[in-house]
Image: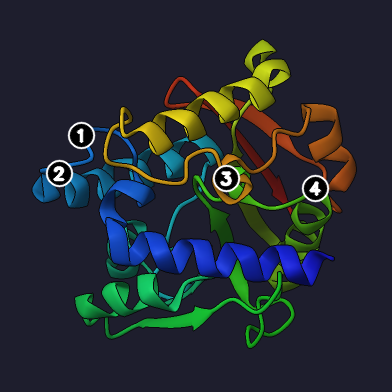
Amino acid sequence: MQTEKLEASHRFWNEKARENPYWYVSSFGPYEGRDLAEFWASGPRIWSDLKNAIGYSPSPGHTVVEIGCGVGRLTRAIAPEVGRVEAFDISEEMLTIAKQANLANAGFHRTEGASLAPVADGAADLVVAYCVFQHLPSEEVLGLYLREMARVAKPGALIAFTMTPRTMKDFFAPALRLRRRLKEVLGSADGAKGLYRSEWVGIRPTEARVRELSPLKLSRTTLHGDKWLFWGRRG
C-alpha cells in the first residue's frame, strides 16, 4: 500500500515539475509570473535561518544530506559552505532542473521509497528536510524517513526537518478539499491544479506523534511563523 502511495506521489510531483516547478516548491507568491530572482534569493535566507535555529556550523569537510531538494533552491545555498551535498527528490523532473546549477560537489538522487541509499551509515554531518514531510502520504512513511535520517547521520551529527502544525482547520480538511476540487472543475480557482489531492495535502501529525516516530530525541521551535522545526542529534 505504501509503495502505491509513494508511486502516486512520484507521478504527482513530476506533473507539477512540468506544470510550474517553482510555485510548487514554494507556493508563496503568485502562480503566474513568479519572480525567480526572489525565489532563488530565498534559498540562502532559509539556509541561514535553519543553521541559526539548530546551531549548525558548516565546514568544508562536512557532508550534508538534503531530502526533497526539488529544483535545488536550498542545495545552491548549502553547497558552497560544505564539502559534499547528497540531494534527494521523488521527482526526476525536479532533479533535472536542480542539476542545471552544475554544482561540482553535489550529487542528485531520485528517491526510491523512503531510502537514502546510496548514502552510507554514519556519513552525514547534517540531514535536512525543509518543507517536504508535510506532503508525505502517511505517518508510516514519515517514520521510515526519520529512521533513514538517523542511519546516515554520524555520531554527534544533526537531523532537522519541518512539519506543518496540526490546527483546527484540519478537522475541516475533507470539506475544504472538496471545495477546492469544485473550484478547479468550475474554473474559478487560480492557476494551480491538484491542491485537493492527497499528494499535496499530505499529513499533519501531532507533535507527540512526530516524537513517537523519531528514533532520536527531538527539540522543536517555530520557524518562519508557520512551521514546526524539529531537530535532534545522534548519540
In which quadrant will I find the N terminus?
Answer: bottom right
How many residues crowd around disc 3 within 10 Å: few (fewer than 14), some, or many (20 or more)? some
Task: State how far apart marks 2 and 1 are (Cα).
Answer: 6 Å
Tell me the mark number nearer the camera, choosing from 4 and 3. 3
Tell me the mark number nearer the camera, choosing from 4 and 1. 1
Residue annotated with mark 4: 139
Residue 7 image-quadrant placement: bottom right
Along the viewing direction, whichever of 216 and 35 lies nearer the viewer: 35
Task: State how far apart marks 4 and 1 are (Cα).
Answer: 30 Å
SS of the residue under disc 4: helix
Say whether disc 2 or disc 4 marks the residue closer to the N-terminus.
2
Kindly check if marks 2 and 1 are in contact, taking CB atoms under 8 A apart as contact.
Answer: yes
Image disc number at residue 215? none
Image disc number at residue 30? 1
Residue annotated with mark 2: 34
* Residue 201 point in image, percent of width and height: 59, 39
How many residues crowd around disc 2 within 10 Å: few (fewer than 14), some, or many (20 or more)? some
Say whether disc 3 or disc 1 marks the residue closer to the N-terminus.
1
Residue 45 image-quadrant placement: top left
* Residue at point 69%, 70% (across, down): 154
